Image (cartoon, rainbow, N blue to C red):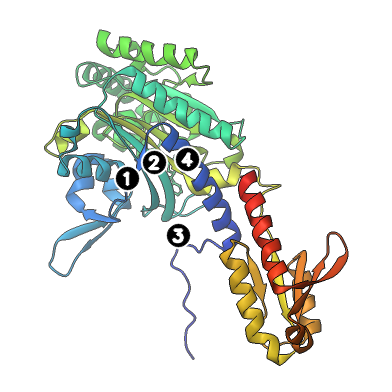
Amino acid sequence: MTVKIRAIRGFRDIPPEEAFRLQDIEVRARKHFERYGYHEIRLPVVEATELFARAIGETTDIVEKEMYTFADRNGQSITLRPEGTASAVRAYLQGGWKSRGGITKIYYSGPMFRYERPQKGRYRQFYQMGLEALGGGGPLVDAEVIELLHRLFELLEINDIRILVNSLGCGECRPSFRGELMEFLERTSDELCSVCKKRIKANPLRVLDCKVPSCIEALKDSPVMLDFLCPDCETHFDRVTEALNGLEVRYEVDPRIVRGLDYYNRTAFEAVCERLGAQNAVAAGGRYDGLASELGGDVPGIGFAIGMERLNQIVDWENRTISPPDYYIAAATPGARVPALNIAGILRGYGYCVEIDLEDRSLKAQLRSANKFNIRSVVIMGDEELERGVLKLKDFDNKTQVELSMDELIQNAANRSRSSKGDA
Ligand code: HAM
């Protein structure tokens, strides 16, 4: 007996209804990003493993245990991208785009891969839309990026997302915070979970992000980065929040936001929605001025990525579903099959969605299908109509049936197409 092949764990099919919604969100998001001057970049799905190890950080969960890493046929270690930022910066440096001057604004959309424990809202292949502003180090860039994200949620009519903002300082001020935090964690280590205990030395900041209730309790009086910012980082953060206030962006300062990737400095943020349950982050990002130097270059940057499955889950889709085709073309006799296909092609040429029977079924069965698809306009043609050069057009909305010449039907369709284009 042949064994049935199923998708591998953590990988799933996105059925047409869900793909339709994702596409709808994506189209809106693309237009929105473009209004702010971002342009699409298509990045490779596979990169040299070293890119992620250097950019994301050797001691992060992603690099330590979540990457899909393989040796290719030449023995080179390659990795399915777990995120897009590292590739975007690599592309910027490789393309020498600094010479263009100004801020390079790019966005990307596509699958990412992480070997995480699958659960609701967490997959091993998931989709992100992300954007990066490269070449601008000032606080207004941060404010615009966060504002853009906030307005996208507004555009999608989601109003229960909280945007949490923090500053992670810089190479000047973070070491003293890190030292203080490590001391605190060592003092409280008995109350921490086993994962946090291990992280105290390797990556103490990540401990602040632990979701285990006993750790949250133990960390409630821990030192926070905001109290250790150097004057430059403090001014930067103040200017970001001032601008966000001026732009009337709803956000909260949350000193516990630390992010799971090592490349961040200064502004870091997460957008969370309680409706998502345990995996409540729908988007996240921040500034990463030091990332490029890990890759042998130098460019400040900031960006974010949205988890598309999660975003799709919280959009209210009540009135947005796949619409039925505009026309059903029914052939009443065998001789009308090919002419019917012809008419379908002409109407499709005018931009209409047309359904037609391809299985030689009876007229009754065809009309049943039209009804099942909820198609409101049905064109019926048989030998007799063909001879007279006419068609029957049944309109289920107006409950009418008229006889038209082919030219009239096509003219009718062309007029409708023009007026609907005019409405768009
Ligand atoms: P991240 O926080 O790792 O950041 O991922 C961003 C978003 O991707 C998350 O908030 C979540 O919505 C979604 N996501 C992450 N992992 C999964 C998963 N296993 N299943 C489903 N959704 C997931 C980054 O990736 C950074 N590159 C963001 C960034 C861009 N920072 C600066 N620029």
In the rendered image, which residue does mark 1 sit on? 84
Element under disc 1: loop
Q: Are marks 1 and 2 in contact (CB under 8 Å)?
A: yes
Q: Nearer the viewer, residue 168 or 289?
A: 289
Q: In x, y percent, where is residue 233?
A: 28, 14
Mark 4: amino acid: Lys
Residue, disc 2: 130
Position of 389 compared to 239: left or right? right
Identified at 49% across, 47% down, the residue is 26
Which of labels 4 and 2 is toward the front? Answer: 4
Residue drawn at x 43%, y 37% as measured from the top left:
33
Mark 3–mark 2 distance (CA, rounded to whole Å): 22 Å
The residue at the point 61 percent across, 31 percent down is 160
Tell me the residue at 54%/21% (across/down). 250
> Is residue 43 visible from the viewing direction of this image?
yes
Q: Nearer the viewer, mark 4 or mark 3?
A: 4
Task: Tell me which numbered mark, 3 or 2, is placed earlier along the sequence.
Answer: 3
Earlier sequence position, callout 1 versus callout 2: 1
